[in-house]
């Protein structure tokens, strides 16, 4: 295992998590304070997801024509520029949307290839722990975004200044750690399915990614708005996001350890069931602060577990070019979930006061249906 390359990937992709965690709620809260409706906030929040969807179709061409280091320098440079200019973008909704699209494309390429390369660097006996470390690092930086908002406020320029400086560090880290070579797969160069075909090959993994991307986008962009509309101060509402991300970050390593010792599809299914139940109970939990905060931690843990286990199972089942295609499909599904999450939840919040948790519970329930089938198939395969 190339530990320097792995460390560089973990740090660089974690900065992507920081920019995601900081700028999604930043844009949403600034628009909210300016009087924008939840539907408009949902549309603007979905723009990065559209960029991530586009990036899934660009990864294959990038790998054919550019070295790993060049791909990462270009994608991170695009992200850095989009964050640095965001302070002047609120005067023009078109410029704001363009910058959010650029951020989505850059983040998408970085995440798709980062997850593929981390999986390639992992060995089967510790794949759960390595991918959990990746998820922990990503979420830890992502969690710092809402924390900065709670400390500095949504109107402070310090949030974008800190993120921009971190991107400069990431660019330096890429130059030092990422090999300046082309992606090679040798005998495994031929892919056996397309981006769209991945759903037929692994439907439960697709739904797991779709659920978490839906969850992540909604929590970052609309949970502060939802909590504020139910009587919580903006600072406390932003802190809720931090608490959920803390649960995600802290419990991924224990879940990864568990996944290396138990049937992974069962751990996947249990995480989905718990997320669904908490989503259903969230309207009542708002009235019980002593129970709300620990349940938000658990919600972050199990929702993050759904995604981490999906990455582990992808690395377990696919190799070579199929692994790149699977992770490109993950990027596409992430974009779809991040796109429809704020849109559907924004509409649901307009229709019902507790539309947001109901939307989350519904998508979690859909994942549980597919995960049950995957777990049943794994049990039958083990019995043969």
Image (spheres, grey):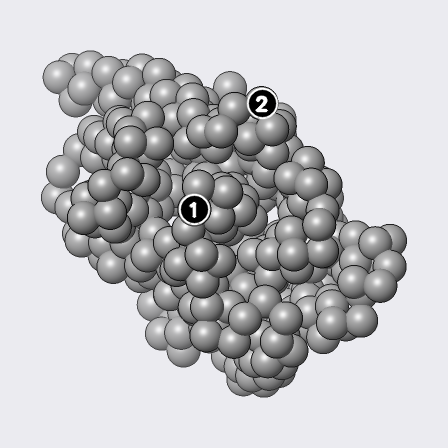
Badge 1 crowding class, 10 Å Cα cut-off, few under 14, some 14 to 19, many 20 or more, is: few
For the point 52% across and 76% down, which residue is it? 152
Q: Is residue 369 left or right of residue 91?
A: left
Q: Quadrant of residue 3?
A: bottom left
Q: SS for tag 2?
A: helix
Q: Which mark is residue 86?
A: none
Marks 2/1: CA–CA distance? 18 Å
First-in-chain label (2 vs 1): 1
For the point 48% across and 58% down, which residue is it? 234
Say above or below: 174 vs 307.
below
Give the image location of residue 127, x and y in percent.
28, 52
Q: Which residue is mark 1?
A: 231
Give the image location of residue 372, x and y in percent.
28, 18
Q: Which mark is residue 351?
A: 2
Number of marks present in the image shown:
2
Q: SS for tag 1?
A: loop
In the image, 294 versus 130, the foreground residue is: 294
Give the image location of residue 114, x and y in percent.
51, 59
For marks 2 and 1, give the one nearer the viewer.
1
């Amino acid at each position: 295992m190339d530990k320097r390359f792995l460390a560089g990937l973990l740090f660089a992709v974690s900065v992507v998590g920081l920019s995601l965690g900081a700028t999604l709620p930043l844009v949403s809260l600034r628009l909210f304070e300016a009087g924008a409706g939840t539907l408009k906030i949902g549309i603007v929040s979905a723009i990065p997801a559209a960029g991530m969807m586009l990036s899934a179709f660009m990864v294959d061409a990038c790998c054919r024509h550019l070295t790993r280091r060049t791909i990462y320098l270009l994608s991170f440079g695009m992200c850095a520029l989009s964050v640095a200019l965001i302070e002047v973008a609120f005067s023009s909704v078109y410029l704001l949307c363009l910058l959010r699209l650029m951020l989505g494309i850059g983040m998408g390429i970085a995440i798709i290839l980062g997850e593929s390369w981390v999986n390639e660097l992992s060995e089967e006996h510790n794949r759960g722990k390595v991918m959990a470390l990746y998820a922990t690092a990503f979420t830890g930086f992502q969690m710092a975004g809402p924390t900065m908002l709670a400390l500095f406020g949504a109107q402070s320029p310090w949030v974008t200044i800190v993120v921009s400086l971190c991107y400069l560090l990431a660019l330096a880290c890429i130059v030092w750690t990422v090999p300046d070579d082309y992606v090679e797969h040798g005998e495994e160069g031929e892919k056996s399915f397309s981006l769209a075909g991945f759903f037929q090959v692994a439907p439960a993994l697709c739904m797991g990614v779709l659920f978490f991307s839906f969850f992540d986008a909604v929590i970052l962009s609309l949970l502060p708005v939802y909590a504020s509309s139910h009587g919580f101060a903006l600072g406390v509402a932003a802190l809720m996001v931090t608490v959920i991300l803390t649960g995600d970050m802290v419990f991924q390593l224990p879940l990864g350890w568990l996944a290396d010792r138990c049937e992974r599809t069962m751990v996947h299914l249990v995480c989905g069931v718990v997320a669904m139940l908490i989503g259903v109970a969230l309207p009542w939990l708002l009235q019980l602060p002593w129970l709300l905060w620990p349940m938000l931690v658990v919600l972050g843990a199990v929702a993050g577990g759904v995604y981490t286990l999906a990455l582990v199972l992808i690395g377990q089942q696919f190799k070579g070019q199929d692994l790149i295609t699977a992770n490109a499909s993950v990027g596409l599904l992430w974009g779809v979930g991040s796109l429809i999450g704020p849109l559907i939840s924004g509409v649901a919040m307009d229709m019902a006061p507790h539309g947001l948790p109901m939307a989350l519970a519904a998508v979690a329930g859909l994942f549980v249906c597919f995960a049950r089938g995957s777990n049943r198939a794994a049990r039958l395969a083990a019995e043969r």
